């Protein structure tokens, strides 16, 4: 059992607020704590508020601001303007539907309607879809509330180290240096056609494709390098055909990087790797946003099945993509020079992550 305080001192309501943030009962939980906490739950009709990802919970009277509930429970929710709706540090994301894991059903009316302060802030600065201001939204009935990373005073530090082991480097993306034939009026052909021909001749590569981004810079780089260029070629797989994904004028001696992302059930970890040496040059991690629907995969399956819009928070939703993007952005901010040469990305995940 975690926590502190005496059971005989506080009222039932205070007792429940204090102890509802605990982890579920276990076989080691004393009977007198089970009894007192169960009595407190029975004797209060106040709405139950559950904060994720902390898991802290408690009962509060209707009309209590979310920020007030967070402070009483010790939830890490930021605020610097004194609850006037100016700083927007206390943004929260309410979740609706059935939550079997928590034993609650959250109605669309679980929080108060938007007020003039929130409407003004949204008009002036804009609120992300689904967000509310914790200092303005008040509790009306049982509610599950997610505190996003940017609203937390003490930012989460998620570390998942990359195991150092001896491996044979065999990247699917490689660099090739070629000298391309100059344009000839007697042999009309495009720059890409002559580049592919040169790669076939010198490196025995198959017919290659190129995306629009490469085609836009192809002409300028060929002429800047005096018809000598270095290209990054993805050798293809079961889904994508071999293709040119980057081009540099002349002989490129810099390093190329790949991003390896581990999308786990509770965390998302990203590692920036040197594709030539295999060295991990940077790592970053955040909590998986799906954790609000349950720490285990089956709780998430249950939520998705029992709620018509349950898939909104699931694997390939906009919320999940935003978190993945923020992880990559974190690395690019710290290693901007490296990420400019990041040319490939690999994802690994569980089926439900």
Image: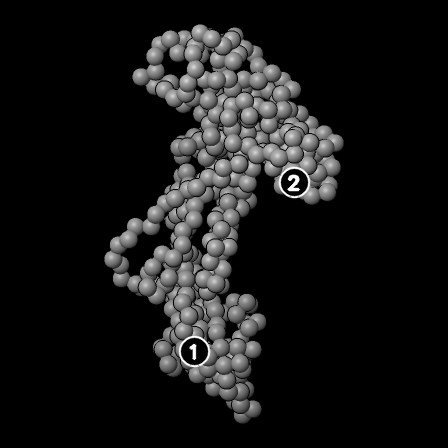
Which residue is located at x 57 percent, y 18 percent? 60
Residue closest to the eye, 1 or 190: 1
Q: Position of residue 291 (x, y in %)?
A: 46, 35
Which residue is located at x 57 percent, y 14 percent? 46
User: How far apart, in angstroms, are the residues tagged by discs 2 and 1?
Assistant: 47 Å
Q: Position of residue 71 (x, y in %)?
A: 55, 25
Q: Position of residue 285 (x, y in %)?
A: 43, 45
**Mark 1 highlights which residue?**
251
Q: Does residue 257 appear left or right of residue 88 in this picture?
A: left
Q: Does residue 322 appear left or right of residue 346 in this picture?
A: right
Q: Can see residue 298?
A: yes
Q: Can see residue 132?
A: no
Q: Does residue 352 appear left or right of residue 127 in this picture?
A: left
Which residue is located at x 56 percent, y 78 percent? 220
The residue lying furthest to the left in this view is: 166
Which residue is located at x 46 percent, y 58 percent? 335
Q: Describe the element under mark 2 as helix, strand or loop.
A: loop
Residue count near mark 1 (Cα–Cα under 10 Å), binned few <14, some 14–19, many ≥20 = some
Residue count near mark 2 (Cα–Cα under 10 Å), binned few <14, some 14–19, many ≥20 = some
Above/below status of 217 relative to 328: below
How many numbered marks, from 0 up? 2
Above/below status of 180 relative to 298: below
Residue closest to the eye, 79 or 349: 79
Where, quadrant-wise, is the C terminus in this rendering? top left
Q: Quadrant of residue 85?
A: top right
Above/below status of 143 relative to 351: above
Q: Which mark is residue 127?
A: 2
Where, quadrant-wise, is the N terminus in this rendering? top left
């Amino acid at each position: 059992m975690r926590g502190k305080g005496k059971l005989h001192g506080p009222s039932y309501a205070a007792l429940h607020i204090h102890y509802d943030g605990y982890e579920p009962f276990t076989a080691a939980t004393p009977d007198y704590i089970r009894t007192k906490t169960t009595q407190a739950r029975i004797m209060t009709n106040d709405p139950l508020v559950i904060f994720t990802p902390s898991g802290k919970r408690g009962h509060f009277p209707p009309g209590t601001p979310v920020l007030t509930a967070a402070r009483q429970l010790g939830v890490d929710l930021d605020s610097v303007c004194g609850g006037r709706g100016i700083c927007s540090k206390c943004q929260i994301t309410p979740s609706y539907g059935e939550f079997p894991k928590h034993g609650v059903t959250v109605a669309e009316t679980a929080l108060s309607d938007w007020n003039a302060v929130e409407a003004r802030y949204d008009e002036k600065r804009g609120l992300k879809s689904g967000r509310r201001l914790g200092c303005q939204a008040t509790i009306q009935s049982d509610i599950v509330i997610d505190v996003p990373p940017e609203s937390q005073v003490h930012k989460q530090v998620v570390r998942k180290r990359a195991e150092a082991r001896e491996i044979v480097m065999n990247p699917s993306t490689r660099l090739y240096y070629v000298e391309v034939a100059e344009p000839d009026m007697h042999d009309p052909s495009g720059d890409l056609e002559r580049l592919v021909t040169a790669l076939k001749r010198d490196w025995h590569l198959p017919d290659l494709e190129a995306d629009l981004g490469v085609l836009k810079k192809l002409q300028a780089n060929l002429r800047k390098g005096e018809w000598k260029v270095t290209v990054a070629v993805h050798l293809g797989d079961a889904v994508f055909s071999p293709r040119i994904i980057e081009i540099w004028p002349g002989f490129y001696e810099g390093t190329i990087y790949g991003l390896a992302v581990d999308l786990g059930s509770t965390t998302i970890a990203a590692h920036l790797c040197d594709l030539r040496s295999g060295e991990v040059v940077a790592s970053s991690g955040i909590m998986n946003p799906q954790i609000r629907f349950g720490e285990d995969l089956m709780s998430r399956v249950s939520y998705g099945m029992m709620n018509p819009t349950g898939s909104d928070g699931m694997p390939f939703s906009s919320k999940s993509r935003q978190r993945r993007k923020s992880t990559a952005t974190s690395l690019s901010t710290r290693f901007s020079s490296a990420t400019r040469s990041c040319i490939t990305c690999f994802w690994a995940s569980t089926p439900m992550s």
